[in-house]
Amino acid sequence: MNLNKYFINIAISLLISCFTFSQEKRLAKADENFSRFAFVDARKIYLQVAKSGYASPELFKKIGDSYYFNAELEKSVGWYEKLVNEYEDQIEPEYLFRYSQSLKNVKRYEDADKAMEKFKLLSGNDQRAEYFVSTRDYLKFIEMQSGRYTLKRLYINSKYSDYAPSFNYQGQLIFASSREGKNSMVKTLHEWNEMPFLDLYISDILGERRALTTPKKIKGKINTRFHESSTSFSKDGQTVYFTRNNFIKKKLKSNVNGTTLLKLYRATLDGEKWTNIEELPFNSDEYSVAHPALSADGRKLYFASDMPDSRGLSDLYEIDIYEDGTFGEPKNLGDRINTEGRETFPYISDSGRLYFASDGHVGLGGLDIFVAVPESLGYSIPYNIGEPVNSSEDDFTFVLDENTKIGYFASNRSGGNGNDDIYSFKQTKELITTCTQYVSGVLTDAYTRNVLPGSEVILLDDNNHEISRVTTNAKGKYKLNVDCGKSYIIRGTNPGYSATEALLETNFALEYTHQLPLQLGEGGLNQKELKPGDDLAEILDLEIIYFDLDKSFIRPDAEIELQKIIATLKEYPNLKVDVRSHTDSRAGDNYNMYLSERRAKSTIKYIIEKGKINKSRITGRGYGETSLVNKCKNKIPCSDEEHQQNRRSEFIIVK
């Protein structure tokens, strides 16, 4: 044995052990800070440890989170990217969502959508994933919605945080600010972001130009040495509901983990001072209740909370206020409004519209502002109100005077004075708050691919009743209006051809595309010889069922081909088919096998559910990258087109 080498190995092992032990001690201290939301202190240690060469998924998560939860999403991108690229098999799906949100912040929307596709694949029935899938052309919709407001920067903003504007119905604007600064002898710094604690300020609104006077602290006992923020006032201006840390009667309370959360309070105006401060009875030391919004008639209070029946980081709730000032029971606003993300900062306009901020609904990045219209049984689906109010940063605390069309909101976008800034706006156009959709496509000969002008396309409901019909133009194109959230049958007809039908289920996308290939009336399937081992795709001269990279959903072009498979299974009642799904060689072998299984299941599910085919007639599984049709193995450079040839499904006859 080489003793010198032996002792060197021992020395190296001891050094590694000491290094690891030292880093683990530092990480333990950082984790302690992180657990009490002291993100800035924790991050300093995490970054030092990372700089020394230490790497782990937990380290990258914590650094990314320390930026993410402080609304510094552009700085979280790199750390989440390291996490996803190096430890994708070891992370929770939630980190793919945070990674996607961070990518949107730097306007990498294509990469953000890819991350959301993976999130959808791994997260099951997460509402955020469902909204993403149902609004794939969200950028197009937001573009249509945009340009309906003109913005104005305000001079009342400080170099710190200013947000949560509200009307007190006395000709004044109330907002939260940490403007006293780090040199104040009174204010202390909040561990979360090392910013001074927030107080409530008041500014007079002057004349038609709505100029704002120099802000002053509101009078009375509302402001404390801890956080006070979002407010909502009764129409007579005599009652205010506001958010504060869990602090009343000079006592600060915390939950079982030692964390001080948020509560709602109510106060009344006595002269010019706010008095009679009381905590609302549905608060709790164990969860936050915050960000009040009164209905115009004062009979309902809306707020955000992570109380036990919430599904996300915070949900929106409503509660009845009785004539004697007592309250009913909190009611969650439900899955149309709430997601597993953050729904927060509600505002109820005089017409009853619900405006709120969310990162769970599909937007431009960070928190976006949405509007939902009151309906007989609650609220409509939320609509993104578009640019310039929304941006790739956090946009929130929206309030609007519907008579003047003037309002205010806050954002941490670049170009402001401080951490968060308040902006005023003038609404110049009405928002789109109805679901506008259409389906378009082309009728062609199934074999020659020649277009078929002068053909008829009929739109039927799911009971086969005709709704409308159009004639294809000189290029064989058609276009039909459809409604959100409904099932349709699209039937293409032309003399000399057999009719072709396609199923359509609308969600909240703007446009759907269905190509309708028609087969000649004579010949067709009955002239084809079917035997075990054959691939139906070849026998029927079908286009191969392709899948997009990293995705398992059925593409519109694939639906057309699957309808032909369904038609064949219906024509041959004894036919049984084995679905074989394949991926390309990109990504890991295990991941590709899992992805191909998902694709096989998606294909089988489509045939069974859409075609009403007995499940005993369809089998299948995924083969991953084990049966490539070309040279594109691991580490061999290939074009996207070559890789796509391997992302396919086969339909092998077994009986």
Image (spheres, rainbow, N blue to C red):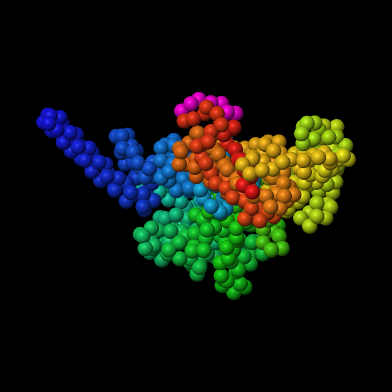
Could you tell me residue 142's position as x and y percent? 66, 41
> In the visual, does 258 lie left or right of 310?
left
Q: Is residue 617 visible?
A: yes
- In the displayed structure image, the side of residue 178 where residue 164 appears, left or right: right
Q: Residue at x 83, y 55 (%)?
A: 465
Asked whether 504 or 157 is in front, the reply is 504
Q: Position of residue 169 (x, y in %)?
A: 63, 57
Residue in front for this viewpoint, 352 or 498? 498
Instruction: Please state the horizontal and vertical placement of residue 309, each as a whole percent of the image.
Output: 52, 63
Q: Please say whether residue 398 is visible from this viewpoint.
A: no
Asked if residue 39 lies left or right of residue 355, the reply is left
Q: Position of residue 451 (x, y in %)?
A: 81, 32
Residue 641 among those drawn in magenta: yes
Task: Magenta stretch: give its range.
Answer: 635-642
Q: Nearer the viewer, residue 137 or 636?
A: 636
**Residue 5 location, quadrant:** top left
Q: How many discs mark residues in the rendered view?
A: 0
Residue beneath the point at 52% across and 58% down: 311
Q: Residue at x 25, y 41 (%)?
A: 20
Q: Nearer the viewer, residue 85 or 140?
A: 85
Residue sitting at x 49%, y 64%: 308
Magenta stretch holds residue 250 = no
Quadrant of the image for the N terminus?
top left
Image quadrant where residue 454 sits:
top right
